[in-house]
Image (tube, helix red, strand yellow):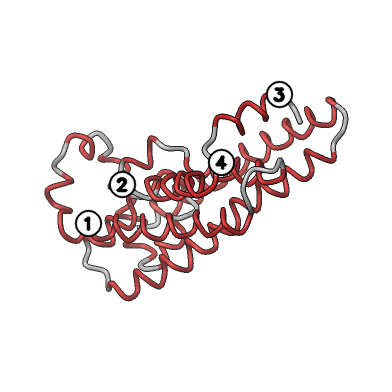
Amino acid sequence: MEDWLQQIIAFLPEGPSYLLLLFLIAFFESLPMVGLLLPGSTLIVMAGFLVVQGKGGLVSLMLAAALGAMLGDLLSFWLGGHFGGRLLAMKSFQRHRELIKQSERFFYNHGGKSIFFARFLGPIRGVTPFIAGLSKMSPRAMLLYAVISAALWGLCYPGLGYFGGASWQQAQSFSAKFGMLVFAALVITLAHYWLKMIFRSAGEGE
């Protein structure tokens, strides 16, 4: 195992404390404004990668990530429904007025499905459930979309890291690993551009 991986693993907590950390990462990334500061999806993918290196278990990671994401979405929804107007007047929300407007357009264009799609669109992940609460979306419908999207997210993102870690472990030479990093960076860049274009077209479709 590479030295940098050993250092990362040694730095992280063990057992239940590690799972709690992963839960909190997924939870806080799902909250409005807080999620803009926390690269939760990247960290959860990295946690999946570390499973292959012997850090934690894949199933427990998926459960912690999915539960954190679901409860974060539900709290964001509750905050929007009960304190939406007052929170929108705060400076932290005012600084991101354009993002709020884009999330509103996205929600009004796609209705309940926006909760599912937003889970996989970083910038609006925590804002869209908040807008849904502010717009008095049905709590039952919100719960359904939150459970489905969080479960899928909890499977996919740790899974991506896990399979990436397995491929990394099988690549013995430095050049092969370097090639994998370049390819991963290219895929991430293209995926980010594609998702950005989808979000932009959805917002302009109002």
Q: Select label 4 or label 2 by which is in front.
A: 2
Residue 179 lies, in percent from the top left, at: 79, 30
Residue drawn where x is 61% and y is 59% of the image = 59
Say what amino acid the circle numbered 2 marks. Pro
Mark 1 = which residue?
A: 80
| For the residues bearing labels 1 and 2, Cβ distance under 8 angstroms | yes
Residue count near mark 4 (Cα–Cα under 10 Å), binned few <14, some 14–19, many ≥20: few
Q: Which residue is mark 4?
A: 193
**Mark 4 secondary-structure assignment:** helix
3 or 1: mark nearer the eye: 3
**Residue under circle 2?**
32
- Up the image or down, 85 lies above or below 190; here it is below
Q: CA distance from mark 2 to mark 3?
A: 36 Å
Q: Residue at x 15, y 54 (%)?
A: 83
Residue sitting farthest toward the bottom: 140
Q: Please tell me which of labels 4 and 2 falls first in the chain.
A: 2
Q: Which mark is residue 3?
A: 3
Q: Secondary structure at mark 3?
A: helix
Q: CA distance from mark 3 to mark 1?
A: 45 Å
* Percent of width and height locating residue 175: 85, 26
Image marks 3 and 4: residues in contact by CB distance under 8 Å:
no
